[in-house]
């Protein structure tokens, strides 16, 4: 942990806003843990969670306007659910079934929602950074009071696309927020071994980009910091790199075992500053929340995710013909022939 990150007063954010953030954080964690469980049972192939990073994700998204665009990494699904994506649609993506928003063409957790201005998850590291800058350039040209917010981890700050995106954003002064979740680990590589900078946020100065840094486990601090940067961007003052200092308490993904490269004591240290517990205690102290309501919220979300899983698991896969859709506005003859041949072809056994 660090003692340098500023902590803002929770009174700077309205209590109703904090209550909404808390609800979305709790919902995100319960859904995360449920999906990790069914992955371990072999019912879905993959899951990538956000245990311990909920404030950095949910509170930052809450500080945006619904008209703003989000370019996610792969841990920001709680932000998409908070924006209004039905939980059933997200779970359909986990199973890659007929109702999957991306029609079974992506890995689990690689979901998108164009109508909610939430871009498609792209696995290659850092690629979404340039996508966000390009869209922000269009926003600026059209004079719209919107921003593009892009999430990425500490590892992505060493990528080619980080350099390209920061260079162009600084030169063009576009309304983009670079939301850096510094969770200390790029899979198994600790941040101090991939970068010699004392603080990742210091990289902003060389690109002519404004910088901000806050305690990413403090929902109020995150919300306030992002809201201020958004106001700057809408006012025409350009981009901001925001370092949200947090910690990835879980594995990188269900394909990873963090016990191979880090100590349990380190995880326990960050457990003591759990973002959900911290916000819960603030709300209780303010007299707007209590243990009974917390239990009721947990039971409500547990029932919701259980029902969504049960329904999604029974749905069939997408049709074979669907893989030929969304390619051309009008299907050309050769693609039609390929589709028909595919539909007539041999099939593997249902279970293999």
Image (spheres, helix red, strand yellow):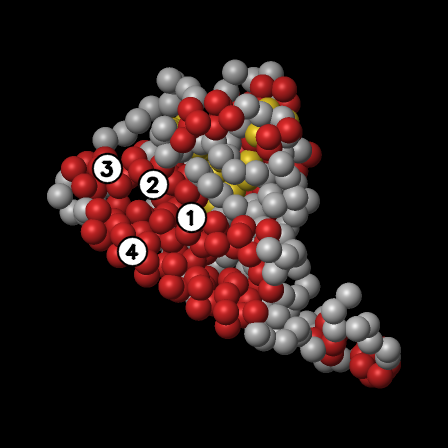
Look at the picture and state if 135 lies above or below 96: above
Indicate left or right for 69 with 217 as reference: right
The quarter in which the C terminus is drawn is bottom right
Label 3 CA crowd tier, 10 Å (few <14, some 14–19, many 20+): some
Q: Position of residue 185 (x, y in %)?
A: 57, 30
Task: Work out whether mark 3 precedes mark 1 in sequence or the reverse, and give the earlier one.
Answer: 1
Question: Could you say which disc has been placed on residue 106 in the image?
Answer: none
| Image marks 2 and 1: residues in contact by CB distance under 8 Å | yes
The quarter of the picture where residue 240 lies is top left
Inter-mark Cα distance, 3 to 1:
17 Å
**Which residue is labeled 2 in the image?**
276
Inter-mark Cα distance, 3 to 4:
15 Å
Question: Could you say which disc has been placed on residue 281 in the image?
Answer: 3
Inter-mark Cα distance, 2 to 1:
9 Å
Q: Secondary structure at mark 1?
A: helix
Look at the picture and state if 37 lies above or below 322: above
**Which residue is labeled 4 in the image?**
297
């Amino acid at each position: 942990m660090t003692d340098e990150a500023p902590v803002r007063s929770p009174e700077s954010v309205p209590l109703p806003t904090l209550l909404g953030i808390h609800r979305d954080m709790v919902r995100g964690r319960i859904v995360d843990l449920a999906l990790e469980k069914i992955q371990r049972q072999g019912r879905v192939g993959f899951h990538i969670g956000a245990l311990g990073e909920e404030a950095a994700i949910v509170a930052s998204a809450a500080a945006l306007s619904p008209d703003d665009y989000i370019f996610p990494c792969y841990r920001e699904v709680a932000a998409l659910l908070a924006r209004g994506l039905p939980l059933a649609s997200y779970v359909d993506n986990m199973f890659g079934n007929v109702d999957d928003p991306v029609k079974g063409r992506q890995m689990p957790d690689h979901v998108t929602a164009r109508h909610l201005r939430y871009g498609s998850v792209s696995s290659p590291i850092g690629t979404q950074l340039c996508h966000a800058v390009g869209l922000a350039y269009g926003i600026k040209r059209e004079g719209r009071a919107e921003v593009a917010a892009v999430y990425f981890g500490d590892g992505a700050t060493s990528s080619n696309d980080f350099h390209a995106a920061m260079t162009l954003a600084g030169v063009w002064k576009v309304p983009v927020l670079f939301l850096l979740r510094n969770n200390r680990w790029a899979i198994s590589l600790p941040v101090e071994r991939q970068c010699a900078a004392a603080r990742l946020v210091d990289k902003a100065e060389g690109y002519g980009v404004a910088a901000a840094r806050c305690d990413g486990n403090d929902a109020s601090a995150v919300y306030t910091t992002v809201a201020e940067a958004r106001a700057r961007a809408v006012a025409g003052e350009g981009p901001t790199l925001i370092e949200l200092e947090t910690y990835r308490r879980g594995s990188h993904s269900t394909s990873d075992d963090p016990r191979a490269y880090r100590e349990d004591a380190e995880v326990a240290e960050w457990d003591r500053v759990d973002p959900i517990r911290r916000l819960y205690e603030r709300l209780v102290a303010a007299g707007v929340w209590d243990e009974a309501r917390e239990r009721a919220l947990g039971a409500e979300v547990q029932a919701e995710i259980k029902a969504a899983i049960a329904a999604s698991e029974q749905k069939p896969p997408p049709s074979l013909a669907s893989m030929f859709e969304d390619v051309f506005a009008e299907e050309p003859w050769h693609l039609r022939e390929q589709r028909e041949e595919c539909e007539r072809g041999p099939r593997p056994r249902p279970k293999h």
